[in-house]
Amino acid sequence: MRLIRWPPDRRLTADDVEAVERVRAVDSTAEVLLRQRVRIGLPLVVVWAWLARPTPEAFAIGAAVAMLGLLVRGAAASHLTKHTGLVTEGPYALTRNPLYVGTALMVAGLLIAAHSWLAGLLGAAYFLTFYPPAIRREEQSLRARYGRAFDEYAARVPRFWPRLRAAGSTQFRWSWRLYGRNREYTAAVGVLIGLVFLWLQMRRGS
């Protein structure tokens, strides 16, 4: 649940109470959706595998997109030091949610490689249903923790789509220590398993 900061010298008005209740309603909806994310996601993976009809061209393009997603996530993880301050450099200077951008690219890559329109539609519906609430919930937590600093950061950096024009003035680094601490290797293992499955299926079909 989001922590609401309130000045001690100010009394709550009816509008204030209504605003707090709206925040609680949004948080409750997000929590319900997040609890269902894994339950629905696992069956969708099975459906994705069943619908997959990979071709060499689709596999090559999809694998490249998925690898780009892993690179974006890895770069984000290399800058992410949790609970030690608001991260605003590297990929976080281009988008407030580079991990989710990387995830979107990974999922898109695997869907492209699967070469199934139905699987693609299901994957897009899943992402659009569950990830926006997750992003909003995390940003509420950051706003509650960092207050004005986060508001100023959010005012200059987009929530999702990167502002690529800022890449030239941003310093990037790669830290294997942070990569491992943030367990980013689990995403790489998942993508690798998916690509190996599609490759074997493609070879079997040929």
Image (spheres, helix red, strand yellow):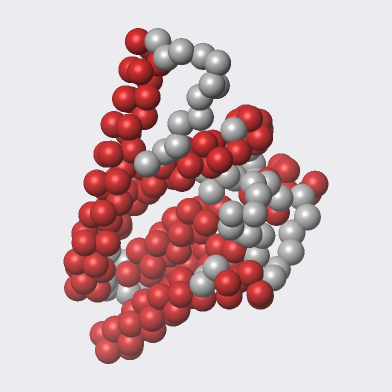
Front residue of this view, candidates 8 and 102: 8
Front residue of this view, candidates 1 and 119: 1
Give left or right: position of 183 versus 2: right
Front residue of this view, candidates 84 and 106: 84
Can residue 195 be seen by looking at this rendering? Answer: no
| Number of numbered discs visible in the structure rendering | 0
Percent across and percent down for residue 32 are 24, 46
Q: Quadrant of residue 27?
A: top left
Q: Residue at x 28, y 39 (%)?
A: 28
Q: Residue at x 44, y 56 (%)?
A: 104
Can residue 115 be seen by looking at this rendering? Answer: yes
Q: Quadrant of the N terminus?
A: top left
Q: Quadrant of the C terminus?
A: bottom left
Q: Residue at x 27, y 39 (%)?
A: 29
Give left or right: position of 138 versus 133: right
Give left or right: position of 137 versus 147: left
Percent across and percent down for residue 33 are 26, 47
Percent across and percent down for residue 142 are 53, 42
Front residue of this view, candidates 62 and 24: 24
Percent across and percent down for residue 112 are 38, 64
